[in-house]
Image: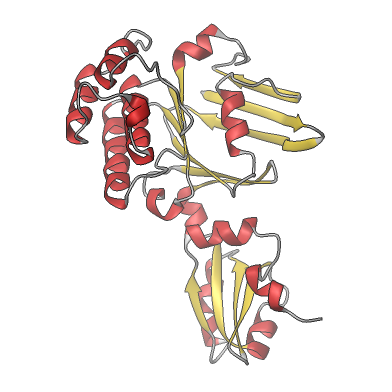
Amino acid sequence: MNIIECKRLTKVYGGAKALNNLSFEIKENKITGLIGRNGAGKTTLLKIIAGYFRETSGEVKVFSEKPFNNLLVSANVIYINDQMNFPTALSLKEILNISSTFYENWNHELADRLFDYFSFQHNQQYNNLSKGMKSTFNTIVGLSARCALTMFDEPTTGMDAAVRKDFYRALLKDYIDFPRTILLSSHHLNEIEDLLEDVLLIKDGKELLHIEMEDLKAYAIGVQGLTTAVEEWVKNRELLHSKNIGLDRMYAVVKHHDAESYTERAKAPGLEITPVSSSDLCVYLTSNTKGGIDDVFIKD
């Protein structure tokens, strides 16, 4: 069953397209990573799915219904980001107690355990928390709500490395206990790739890839060696990225079409062929140039 369906989805702000003819489907009970650079359209997409914004054109359906101003969608979706607001008159504990009345599957025991684990105090006020602690509290609400569609938009903003690891661990364990559809937008793909079942990679509001995580890991290979040898080797291959290393050496990344590429070292003496990390690959695919920042220093 498809939880989310987008067809030619477009959102325009002041003449600029935040989303541009975007089409994809998300099936139920999967953890999907929404990956892209700042300004790629991730937040706009999530807010349209949550029913906060109306699309300019195209079609979006959540639980087979249009999400904008839809009570069914609102009752079964939670959207967590670093711009959340909670009533200033309530303490953190009171916010959790009242939240339980909004979400049918709210797990109060989980909320209490996470609240204590992360050392929150009952009488603390949300507005007095640090940025990292606000993000941590937001994730407690997001996990405890156990909504059929749970969306985390850069949820670890301000968290230190240890707390990020704890959040990812908590997300995975609770997902196993209570499967639901989770969309996780993050700049830290290297930290979350073991959580993800598939990845939706977007650039300039368009889909670049919607692929299973295991396929993404095998999507490309890297080759390094003398510049002339590398340039010869990458001919007739789909070049994704290249950069010079020193005066006469080069590193290149090409799309990996089949297993044969890993045996090419026997045919290309002096070249080193290596896998490419998923995180690096997404950076290369979303770059505006093949050489990245190195292109700035190329003199005409």
The answer, for residue 179, to whether it is visible in the render is: no
Q: Quadrant of residue 227?
A: bottom right
**Left or right: 291 with respect to 192?**
right
From what the image shows, is residue 261 above or below residue 187? below
- Nearer to me, 120 or 115: 120
Q: Which residue: 69% across, 84% down?
A: 232
**Left or right: 19 with respect to 26?**
right
How many marks do you count on the picture?
A: 0
| Relative image position of residue 155 (x, y in whole percent) | 42, 38
**Left or right: 254 with respect to 82?**
right
Q: Quadrant of residue 58?
A: top right
From what the image shows, is residue 216 above or below residue 196? below
Q: Which residue: 68% across, 68% down?
A: 290
Q: Quadrant of residue 229?
A: bottom right
| Relative image position of residue 22 (x, y in whole percent) | 70, 36
- Nearer to me, 216 or 190: 190
Q: Which residue: 22% across, 36% down?
A: 118
| Relative image position of residue 183 (x, y in whole percent) | 47, 34
| Relative image position of residue 291 (x, y in whole percent) | 66, 71
Q: Which residue: 33% across, 27% down?
A: 143
**Left or right: 100 with respect to 251?**
left
- Nearer to me, 269 or 8: 8
Judging from the image, the colouring scheme is secondary structure
- Nearer to me, 238 or 190: 190
Instruction: Say which quadrant the C terminus sits in.
Output: bottom right
The answer, for residue 62, to whether it is visible in the render is: yes
